Amino acid sequence: METFVQQIINGLVLGSMYALVALGYTMVYGIINLINFAHGEVLMVGALTSWTVVTLLAESGLPGWLILLISLLCAIVVCAALNFTIEKAAYRPLRNAPRLAPLITAMGMSLLLQTLAMIVWKPNPKPYPILLPNEPIFLWADGPVIGVVQCLILGLTVAILAGLLWLVNRTKLGRAMRATAENPRVAALMGVRPDMVISATFIIGAALAAVAGVMWAANYGTVQHTMGFLPGLKAFTAAVLGGIGNLAGAVVGAVLLGLVEAIGAGYLGELTGGVLGSQYVDIFAFALLILVLTLRPSGLLGERVADRA
């Protein structure tokens, strides 16, 4: 039972990090029907930016939590500027082009960012300093444990989802997002500026990716230029599982994917008699995606994309 509960905790933490990235995917797709495959690389840039700031402040004598906060803010600023530039330079000129053109552009941008990051930060993995207390918190005596960083990841995900739902449903920007998603031309006639709304959406998505990148680095203790590819792919899978364009669906899909991976990693060797180890856990993730797409192509909570007039 202790092992099972521990894997549930690990799955919730992993799913929460996937959710932060999946929310960025689903927001952009909900407005302009674009899958931004460079989103995982934005996460990577956020993590490496944070590592740079943490390294510079390591000898400053500041508390670890303050260094982490400063590095997080710097990562958000850098990622927001990067995603704004990507949208303006790479995606906006192709907004009315056939869907294949921006899709190929997104893949090319992903490879370009990886290459630039390799040039700037070098290809070798770098250890991410421990900034928060790493003493395990026991849920009960000699039972499952959870760390401070893991608690922070879970809390941030819940708070960010609540904030996004409030933003989309209760604010002027949220109404402009929904209007732009339904019909950009009519929204423009009603005083909405679609270009500004789309740029704001990319900036919000970049901020979420930066948070995910810093939390990923703090949780796993290493950063490198290829670290964004797999989380980006898994987050896209989670968004599709939950229902692309659906904020709550992205979180549900991400948490479900994290649980499947964690439980699979814990029991895969046992179930296969040692033939397959935890390194094959991706089998479960993508098998689940195929199953859901076969039985319910719109995702668990349904695809939520406005019908354009």
Image (tube, rainbow, N blue to C red):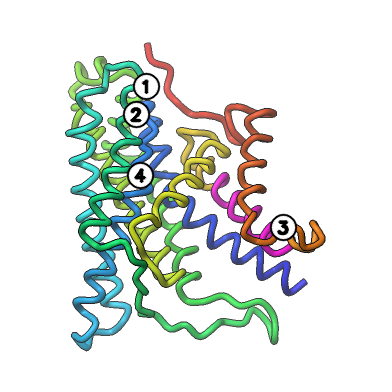
Mark 2–mark 3 contact, CB under 8 Å? no
- Say left or right for 198 vs 140: left
Q: Quadrant of residue 184?
A: top left
- Residue in front for this viewpoint, 301 or 80: 80
Image disc number at residue 100: 1
Between discs 4 and 1, the one toward the N terminus: 4
Where residue 244 appears, x then y in whole percent?
Answer: 49, 33
Q: Tell me how far mark 2 sits from mark 3, CA to CA.
A: 35 Å
Q: Quadrant of residue 174?
A: top left
Identify residue type, mark 1. Leu
Residue designated by label 3: 276
Q: Mark 4 vs mark 3: give the one in front.
A: 3
Q: Tell me how far mark 2 sits from mark 4, CA to CA.
A: 14 Å
Secondary element at image label 3:
loop
Between discs 3 and 1, the one toward the N terminus: 1
Residues rendered magenta in the picture: 252-267
Identify residue type, mark 4. His
Judge whether 30 appears above or below 129 on screen. above
Judge whether 137 appears above or below 282 on screen. below
Mark 1–mark 2 contact, CB under 8 Å? yes
Where residue 151 appears, x then y in whole percent?
Answer: 49, 70
Q: Within 10 Å of the Cα at label 4, are there few (<14), some (14-19), or many (20+) other Cα atoms? A: many
Residue designated by label 2: 104
Tell me if residue 255 is in the magenta stretch: yes
Q: Tell me how far mark 4 sits from mark 3, CA to CA.
A: 31 Å
